[in-house]
Image (tube, rainbow, N blue to C red):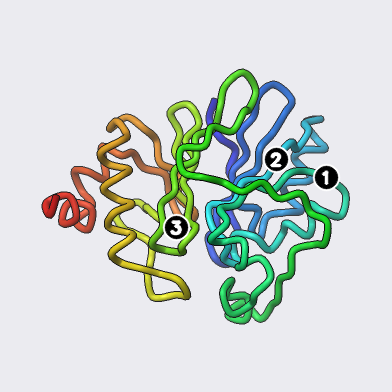
Amino acid sequence: MTPVVFTDPSFGQNCYLIRAKTDVAAIDPGFNGEALLAYLTEKGYRLTMVLLTHGHYDHIRDLRVLQKTLTFPLYVHPLDEPFLSDDALNGSTFFHGSFRLKAGQPVVPVADGMAIPFGTGTIQAIHTPGHTPGGVCYLFENDLFSGDTLFRGDLGRTDLAGGSSRLLAESVKKLFKGLSDGVVVHPGHEYRTTIGEERKTNHQVQAILKRT
């Protein structure tokens, strides 16, 4: 099943929905909350979880929109959980905003290799620090949701709070050693690609893999 994507026109942030029958998991509800809610209502689907690839404002802001009418567990790596209550970490001031996670929100800590039950299968969490300390990619079937770790022709920036070029390089090695070329990559911004395409054309990935 092809994931449904909602793209914010201002900053190009992608929110993804994956579905198992009528159950839906949302990944990074940044600036797309109203569209997401309208889609769920139209289709009669139920939001069963929200997964965060990391804690930057453009990927978390509309959690508050969803929380107004829905109850769901929030999956986030513990190293990025502080981003959900610290504007200096989540970068909300860059967007002239502020973010504090709603009190009482059920939070599930994500660990590397964690298998999150979804439908009749699982969503695999892959800890990929570098853009943020608690960055996570999620693999569901043949689809990888890479947040701001891996882009089409690019990698995530490492000059923000908690960023590390060394850790990002290690995360890239992990992804490209562990995933097949046919895996489809759905990044946090811009357009989808594949592991194989990035292996062939992404010069930053190539440079990292040559050092191994």
Q: Is residue 123 above or below residue 34?
A: above
- The foreground one among 70 and 74 is 74
Tell me, yes or no, whether the two marked residues, 2 and 3, touch with CB atoms within 8 Å.
no
Where residue 212 sits in the image (x, y, percent)?
A: 14, 50
Q: Quadrant of the N terminus?
A: top right
Q: Residue furthest right?
A: 69
The residue where tag 2 is placed is: 49
Q: Earlier in the sequence, mark 1 or mark 3?
A: 1
Q: Secondary structure at mark 1?
A: loop
Amino acid type at mark 1: Thr
Neighbor class of circle 3 (other Cα within 10 Å; few <14, some 14-19, many 20+) is: many
Q: Secondary structure at mark 2?
A: strand
> Is residue 6 among the parts visible in the rendering?
no
Q: Is residue 141 above or below residue 162?
A: above
The residue where tag 3 is placed is: 148
In this picture, residue 51 sits left or right of residue 182: right
Neighbor class of circle 1 (other Cα within 10 Å; few <14, some 14-19, many 20+) is: few
Q: Is residue 40 above or below residue 211?
A: above
Q: Which mark is residue 71?
A: 1
Amino acid type at mark 2: Met
Q: What residue is shown at x 78% (from left), y 60% (from top)? A: 64
